Amino acid sequence: MKERIILKTITAILIFVRPGLFVFSFALLGLLSPAQTLAMPGDVAEVNGKGIAFADLEAARVSVFVGLASAPAEPDEATLHKQYRYVLTRLIEEMIVCVYMEKKGIAPEAGALEAEEARIRADYPEGAFEEMLLNLGLDLEDWRKRLYRRLMVEHFASNVLRPEISISSDEAQEYYRAHSAEFVIPELWHFLRILGRDSKTVEAARADLVAGQNADAVRKKHLVTIHDINIGMDLLADDVAAVLKPLKPGQSSKIEKSGDEWRALLLLQKSPVSIQEPAEISRRIEQALTEEKVPAIYATWLQNQLKKSKVRISPALLEEYKPPAASSQ
C-alpha cells in the first residue's frame, strides 16, 4: 500500500509536468561554462546569479527516478551521474523560465499555490502525504518551492508561449480531414442494469422501473443494485450488446443468472451516430494544433534566452561520466 502511495505521489509532484516543454539537450551542456567555484557553497549550477543547490538536484532526482520499475533502488555511479545530468538540464531550463517570468512581473494568481497543494493533498489519507515526503527525504518547504516553480512553468506556457501561436483555417481544415473519425460520437445506448440475489426480487424491481418508478425508490424497496449506464455501443461487452440489440426504449430483457446474482437490462434510449458540435470540434482542433506547435516555439525562445543568460555548471556534471582509474595492485 505504501509503495502505491509513493508512486502515485511521485507522479503528482513531478517538477516536470509538461515533459514536451523541456527541450534542453545534453549536447547544449557543452556550450555552457564550467566553474570550479560557484556563488554559494553546495551549488551545482548557477543561472543568472541564482544557484541550484545539490539538495534541490537530489530532491528532483528522487522525485523523477525513485520508485520507477526500471530504476534500481541503489543505482551505480554511472547511472547516478546520468540521472543527475538529466535532472539538472531541466532544472536549468526551469530556472531560466522562472527568472524571465520574475523580470516580466508575471506570476500565478494569488492563492494558486495553496489551491494546488490542497488538490494534491486531497488524494491522500490524513498523514499519508507527510509520510510520503519523509520517506522520500523531501522537506515540505522545499517541495512547496518546487511546486511553485512548476506553476510558474505552466503559467509561462499559457501566458507567454501560447499567445505566440496562430492557427490558420487551412491548418484547421487539414487537421479535421486527417482526424475526422475522432469527432464522431458512436451510437450511445442508455440502459439500467438491475442486479439482485433472487429472480423474484429482480422481477419486482424491473416491473416497478418499467412502470416509471424512481430508481432510488426501487433500490430501497427491493434491495437491488441498479446501475445507470450510458455508453457507446462499440464499448459494450458482446454478451450485453446481444441482449440489448433487439430491445426498443422502455423494453426489458428477460431475467438471467449472472454469476452469483440475477440480472435484467432495461433499455432507456438509443442515440444514433452523430458528429460533435462545431464549437467543440473547433476547440479540440485548436488545442491539438497548439500543443503540436508549443515545443518548436519554446525551443526558439530558449535558444534566444540562452544567448542572454549566464549559466555555469560544476565540472563534475558538465562532462559525461568517467569511471575512476583502477587502483594499482
Image (cartoon, rainbow, N blue to C red):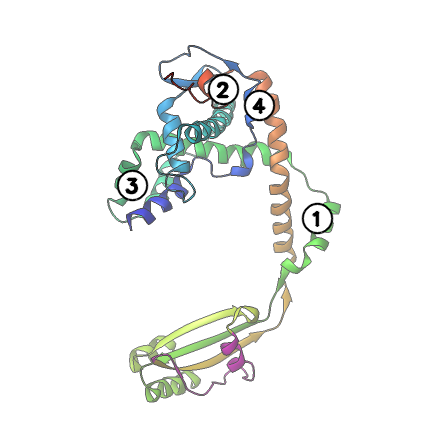
Mark 2 lies on residue? 318
- Percent across and percent down for residue 329 are 36, 17
Instruction: Give the magenta-colored segment's residue range.
Output: 238-260
Q: Kindly give the residue lying farthest to the front in the view shown.
A: 329
Q: Residue sitting at 58 percent across and 26 percent down?
A: 302
The numbered dot on residue 132 is 3
Mark 4 lies on residue? 28
Q: Report which quarter residue 316 is drawn in.
A: top left
**Lower sequence index among marks 3 and 2:** 3
* Relative side of 254 to 129, left or right: right
**CA distance separating discs 1 and 2:** 43 Å
Q: Report which quarter residue 247 is drawn in.
A: bottom right
Question: Closer to the observer: label 4 or label 3?
Answer: 4
The numbered dot on residue 172 is 1
Label 2: how many Cα within 10 Å (few below 14, some 14–19, many 20+):
many
Residue 248 against residue 295 in the figure, above or below = below
